[in-house]
Image (cartoon, helix red, strand yellow):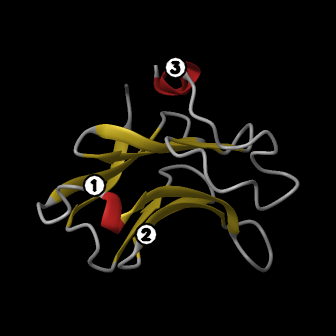
Amino acid sequence: MTIRVTAQAQLIVGEAQVIESLTPEGPFAAVFEDNGETGYFYALDGDIDGNAIQDALHIYNAADVSDRHMPSDVKVGWSEDGKKCVLLINGYPHGVFDFETKNGYCRSAFPPPISREWSISGHDWNDSVDDLFG
């Protein structure tokens, strides 16, 4: 997986934290948020008037993470073209946004799509997701 890491932080699951990442090229951004109960990954488009959030991916429920008391390494990285990003927690991909095809993918496949433009087929993870960064 070839990525350009633009944000990195240490996280204790269940402790509120926001990690923002801007694409090296273009108007896109991604934000990971642990609000103390859940972890979500958001796709943002700075060229959109009003609400810039285009899609949202459920990453975890804090109460369900068995090693939540241990620090985790969080990275957000972008593809060479700046149109795809990945959320890595301890080196493992948990969420991906493809801004070109307007799709988001996560291990939980939740929530249902929040718009008529993004992830209209859902957020199901599949093996082709890893190929987006090849």
Q: Residue at x 11, y 60 (%)?
A: 70
Q: Earlier in the sequence, mark 2 or mark 1?
A: 2
Q: Which residue is mark 3?
A: 131
- Quick one: SS at disc 1? strand
Eyeballing the image, is 36 above or below 23? below
Q: Which residue is mark 1?
A: 74
Q: Earlier in the sequence, mark 2 or mark 3?
A: 2
Eyeballing the image, is 128 above or below 35? above
Sort mark 2 into few (<14), some (14-19) or many (20+) by Cα contacts within 10 Å: some
Instruction: Give the number of the mark in front: 2 or 1.
Output: 2
Q: CA distance from mark 2 to mark 1?
A: 15 Å
- Residue 104 position, x and y percent, is 63, 45
Q: Quadrant of the N terminus?
A: top left
Badge number at residue 38: 2
Q: Amino acid at mark 3?
A: Asp
Q: Is residue 92 left or right of residue 70?
A: right
Q: Earlier in the sequence, mark 3 or mark 1?
A: 1
Q: Residue at x 69, y 71 (%)?
A: 52
Q: Residue at x 57, y 20 (%)?
A: 128
- Quick one: SS at disc 3? helix
- Quick one: SS at disc 2? strand
How many marks the image carries: the answer is 3
Badge number at residue 32: none
Q: Do residues under tags 3 and 1 come within 8 Å of each other at their CB atoms?
A: no
- Residue 96 position, x and y percent, is 52, 42
